[in-house]
Image: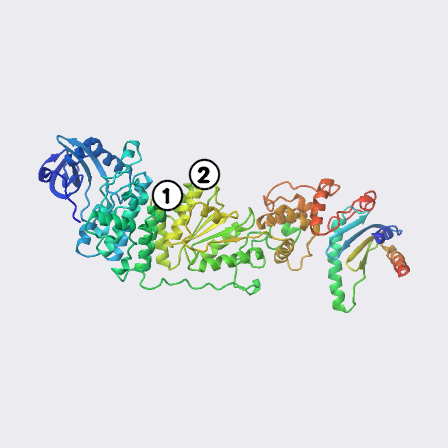
Amino acid sequence: MPERSTAPPDLTALAGLKLGNYRLERLVGRGRMGVVYLAKDEALLRPTAIKVLSWKVAEAGGHDPVQWFLSEARLVARINHPRVVQIYGAARHGDYCYIAMEYVAGQSAEAMVAREPMASVLATDILIQVASALHAAHGSGIVHRDVKPANLLVGAGGVTKLGDFGMALGPSGDRAANARLRVGTPYYTAPEIWRGEAASPASDIYSLGATYFHLLTGRPPYPHRDVASVEQAHLRSPIPDPRELVRTLPASCASLLQRALAKAPRERHASAQEVLWDARRVLQDLTSTAPAPAAAPRPREAPDAAAAPARPPLPPATGALAEVLGFVRQPFSDVGPSEFPRLAEPLAAARARLLERLEDGATSVVALAGEDGCGAGLLHRALAAELGPSRLVLRVNGDEDTDGRLLLHRLCMAAASEEAPQDLEALVARLDGERARRGIRPLVMIEGISSEPAATAALTGVVGAALWTRSFQVLLGGEPGLLEKLARARVDFRGEQASEIRVAPLDREQLSRHLRAWIQETLAPHAPPIIITPDALRLVAMRSGGGLERVNCIAENMLVLAASERRRTLCSWHAWTASDHERWAGARTELPRRPQVWPPPEVVDVIDACRRGAGMPPWPRGASAGTREGAASWPSSR
Amino acid sequence: MAELAMISKIPNVRSAVLGDLAGGFHDAVREQDGETIAAVMGFVASAMAEAGEQLGLGALSRISVSSEARACLVQVRGGSVLTAFIEPGAALPAVEKVIDGSTRGKV
């Protein structure tokens, strides 16, 4: 369906005219709003495209031509994006209004596809670039309203720019009245626009989908000859499958188009960025002639630590722990489950499940959830060290991200991305490059996720990118319910069975085994044993809530206290007194001293509560236990 | 509990603690740190019971340790561990005799 030019005939004969610094050289295009000349900027000596307004169109629309024309320039000037044709200036010169803009040496996608359908790789590459530009426009509150092959300018090396914002709708009130005007080119116009609804980013996405269909197949999705038939097809006809026209296209290509061309705006991609990610995935399918080489399966560690290969040693014990108690290695220091499976037994199960999911090609997002201090942080660190040699691992903290910008900034910094510091698109491109280079998806680990809504929005972007592009995997760490929270924030898991792996708190049995294993592993082989009373164990369980990191901290401090008393028995006083948040080993801190009488009544009440839970009789009170007079003196070395 | 009261009344028994083989603390007489003693003696009794099994002694019933100044007697019955501290250490045989007599009397 040829487009009829409404430009007045005299506008096509302006070659040689000078408008400001620009000497018009030759007519290179014409459209509904005016004509475009290639001009020379005589001040900067560069080629420039000059768009000259067609007065007739502006007058016919009943608008002030200068304001109408300037608004296009102002809208585009809001968008600072390398894939949007840049505006150099706008002015009125005599009888002419014109916009000076970046000249793209090349041709429009429409001209390229006029001869034959584009190669699918090139078409998809163009889609990615235009989706990126459109995402930037939408981010600036601008709806293009006329996305079509003719407005995609393909330059050297396939660099494509989105141009002609003459129909665009900005966020300002003065243009709101135009929102429901039916503009655009019929072949690419979304159903809701035909119904008289307002244009939105979703209608641009539809137009982009229709454009992509055209590039791939050489014709628009509904190539009827009259506008009424085209309208009905947009509104009612099934979405065509491009593979009926080009059989070699992958299923992902058809899937992308099914979504972008959905009749209902809410069923389309939620943003142009999602289109971009989806397109990246299509590009992966198109460019991978053979499946990407899978990473060599990593041998699983033997359950017995003694049978494991050489492992990094635990740090040596120092101070009173070494000198008084005879520890040769620092007890309760941070170790990963793969290094010392017996010591990190509580995390081993979670680690095994995590690795299973991360090695599963279908999984893009996994959450590792647990209460504060449960050991998830330790597992994150251990996994980062373990997986780092085989793939790119980015590990960042998601806390304190009140405005949602920190997360992206931290990720870009971690990725050492040379692109704009907060550009998700650049980050995804970098990760995708790593995936292609190493043949295994990078892993993005985000811990301690903040509950701020803005932070959730930033997280949603990263998770969405992982799900759509499948260029990388995401491991989230935080409190239980993370994935539900993301689902409530409308993250589309795309049918993926997202898993939240819980790091469960230690029960009393596990806690006891954990403490004994650590002491046995780090104490000198012939040193006398260290004994922990059952009441001390119960208090540690209560104070730590079973959280591994807190258990480790309390236990180490109990040993420090015991060493300061030259005792080898850890009792309820140590468990009650040892800090659960600050490590005392090696610190020059004044340690608490045991009182003359232990436990005081308020502690007895707590111990009794713990004992009740364990089915034990209450702490002995009464005449027999209370007889303190004449109590035996007991050497301090026991 | 009755046995604890009985032992604590034997002459030269300075203090006594009742615990269990797991090291749990149940009661004490004239002892400020019964919790620690119960844990240590629970550990010792368990270790000695294992040693006794290895040596073919059968079920462990008593352990005693003595020096000139002090002695410690550990009586194991079922899961209970009763510990008595004796001063002077030379009084240990007399205390054991009283305990044995008391046990026979009970039977």
Residue identified by numbered label 1 = A422
SS for tag 1?
Answer: loop
Q: What element does badge 2 sit on?
A: loop
Q: Amino acid at mark 1?
A: Gln
Rendered location of residue A179, percent (x, y): 28, 37
Q: Is residue A564 visible?
A: no
Residue A236 visible in the current orientation: yes
Q: In this figure, which residue is indicated by the disc labeled 2?
A: A402
Q: Is residue A112 left or right of residue A439?
A: left
Q: Which residue is painted at 31% across and 57% down in the image?
A: A254
Q: Is residue A180 above or below residue A560?
A: above
**A174 shown above or below A343:** above
Query: x and y percent of residue A552 in the render?
Result: 60, 50
**N-terminal label among 2 and 1:** 2
As rendered, which of A621 and A628 lies closer to the eye?
Answer: A621
Spot the residue most to the bottom. B56
**Chain for numbered disc 2:** A
Looking at the image, which is closer to me, A298 or A130? A130
A327 to the left or right of B93: left
Task: Please name the amino acid that badge 2 sits on.
Answer: Thr
Which class describes the residues within 10 Å of circle 1: few (<14), some (14-19), or many (20+)?
some
Q: Chain of mark 1?
A: A
- The nearer-to-camera label among 2 and 1 is 2
Front residue of this view, candidates A437 and A165: A165
